[in-house]
Structure formats: C-alpha cells, structure tokens
Amino acid sequence: MFKRVVLIFLSTSNFSTREGTIHAIISECQIQGITLNTQIAYVLATVKRETGDTFKPVREGDWIGHSVSDEYRRNNFRYYPYYGRGYVQITWDYNYRRYSEKLGVDLFNYPDLTLEPSNSLFILVDGFKFGVFTGKKISDYINESETDFYNARRCINGLDHAAEIKGFAESFLIDLNNGALS
C-alpha cells in the first residue's frame, strides 16, 4: 500500500523546476504527517541551505560552481563511500542501510541512488520526522506550542548555519501563510 501511494504521488511530482520540487517537498511533508506551516517552512529552509538553493539533490563536497572529485572524497571523507548525498546529505553506512530497508531500494550497494529526487525526498522528511540524523526530531523544536527555528538545526547538523536557516524559514513561513506556495 505504501509504495502504491508513493508511486502515484511521485508520478505527479515535477522535480525539474525549483517550484515543482518545493511543491513536492510540501506534499511529502503532509503525506508523512509534518503538517504545521512552521515545520514545512523549516524543512524548505534546510533544503535551500543544504543544496545551495538549487533544490536539487547534491553530493557532499560540491559547492556552487565547484565540483570535487571522487578521489578527493575518498581521501578526505572518513565515511567514504557513504558520504553525504541528497536534499540533506545522509552519511555513514548505517544510514544508507536503514534507508535501503525503508525504501526497498539498494542504497547501500548503490549509494548514488540517494540522488534520485524521490529517494532524497523521502529521506529528507522521514529524517526530520523521526530524528534519524541526530536523534532530534523537528517536533522537538517546532510544534503547536513553540517555534524555535534556530535550534531546529540540531535535527540535521548541530548549529551549523542555524541563523541563516532561521532567516530562510521565516521567509518561507510568510509565503506559506500567504498562500504563495500552495
């Protein structure tokens, strides 16, 4: 049942544009039970930062206008070949194995499949919902009684770029509340 619902949703998603990806992220959040505009705004803000505002799944180490080699990753990332990939760069073999099981896709033996937008999208939202990346869930910081956009960064990567992402989230929240992203 789960795969059927996902396949129907994904067949109608347009990942070829920034706007299409934003709408797919919003829909996936709602499907997985992340429904507060504050939470959705924070997920969007995270993707904006983690992908360099491309809203495309990326490889860890690729920066705007610069792409690093696989040799560089092999020599500099201690978790190679399970370096970060996706809308949020999942790392480590155990995360690739975990999401292989959840998605029914062999990300462990073929880690580049994490770059497929549909896989990356599921990982993004599921990771936020269940606290997969750091043990912290989005609902720990953003819920019906509090909105802590700054500390919500702890769901992904400590407080790295927390102020910047907070600003992005505030902007996305305005757009969501005004119906500009519906």
Image (spheres, grey):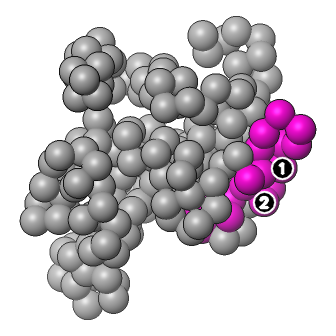
Q: Residues within 10 Å of mark 1 (few under 14, many from 20)?
A: some
- 82 above or below 57? below
Mark 1 lies on residue: 148
In the structure shown, which secondary structural element does the residue marked by tag 1 occupy? loop
Residue 96 magenta: no
Could you say where residue 110 lies in the image, as x and y percent from the top left? Answer: 11, 60
Which mark identifies residue 151? 2
- Magenta part mainly helix, strand or loop? loop
Residue shown at 15% from the left, 48% from the top:
105
- 11 above or below 38? above
Could you say where residue 109 lies in the image, as x and y percent from the top left? Answer: 10, 65
Quadrant of residue 60 in the image?
Answer: bottom left
Three-letter amino acid code of the residue under disc 2: Asn
Could you say where residue 39 lies in the image, as x and y percent from the top left? Answer: 69, 36
Residue shown at 31% from the left, 82% from the top:
79
Measured Cα–Cα span from mark 1 to mark 2: 6 Å
Q: Which residues are magenta?
A: 140-157
- 15 above or below 132? above
Could you say where residue 177 lies in the image, as x and y percent from the top left? Answer: 77, 16
Residue shown at 75% from the left, 33% from the top:
38
Q: Dividing the image into 4 quarters, which one contains the N terminus?
A: top left
Which mark identifies residue 101? none
Q: Give left or right: position of 66 versus 18.
A: left
Quadrant of residue 159 in the image?
Answer: bottom right
Quadrant of residue 73 in the image?
Answer: bottom left
Marks 1 and 2 close (CB-CB < 8 Å): yes
Three-letter amino acid code of the residue under disc 1: Asp
Q: Give left or right: position of 73 versus 89.
A: left
